[in-house]
Image: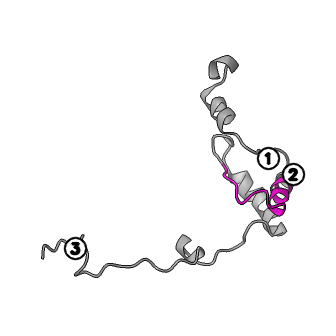
Amino acid sequence: MADAKNLSIRELMIEVTARQSFIGTPTQVAEGIDTLVQEDAADGFILVPHVTPGGLDDFADRVVPLLQARGTFRTDYAGATLRDHLELPPPRRASAGNSARSGATG
């Protein structure tokens, strides 16, 4: 495909991995994302750096606030860790006597 279309490696990656894309002003991008979320047509989005070579700063600074204002993107998290956010119990800690890594040989 790369040879047939004379694609660079970057262009090839975009061609074979591209899904829904949002192009436009921050407001247009936010509207497109919000529409899919409100229609239950999406449960998340993956932002890929090879498609946004300028980085994700503009998205974070200009689109995310618009999504937050619409209630589509959270403004805070339930806790300080992913485990807190997912409401998972704390990990079980092995006691010093039961730990395989404690170095004790019994």
The residue wearing badge 3 is 102
Residue 23 falls within the magenta-colored stretch: no
The span picked out in magenta is 30-47
Apparent side of residue 55 relative to residue 102 in the rendered image (left or right):
right
Mark closest to the chain's N terminus, 2 or 1: 1
Q: 16 or 66: which is nearer to us?
A: 16
Residue drawn at x 68%, y 74% is 76
Q: Position of residue 53 (x, y in %)?
A: 66, 40
Alpha carbons under labels 3 and 1: distance apart: 52 Å
Q: Nearer the viewer, residue 79 or 86?
A: 86
Residue placed under numbered mark 2 in the picture: 28
The C terminus is located in which quarter? Answer: bottom left
Q: On the image, which quarter does residue 37 sit in?
A: bottom right
Mark 3 falls on what kind of element?
Answer: loop
Comparing labels 2 and 3, the label whose residue is closer to the camera? 3
Q: Secondary structure at mark 1?
A: loop
Q: Is residue 21 above or below residue 102?
A: above
Taking 54 as reference, is 35 left or right? Answer: right
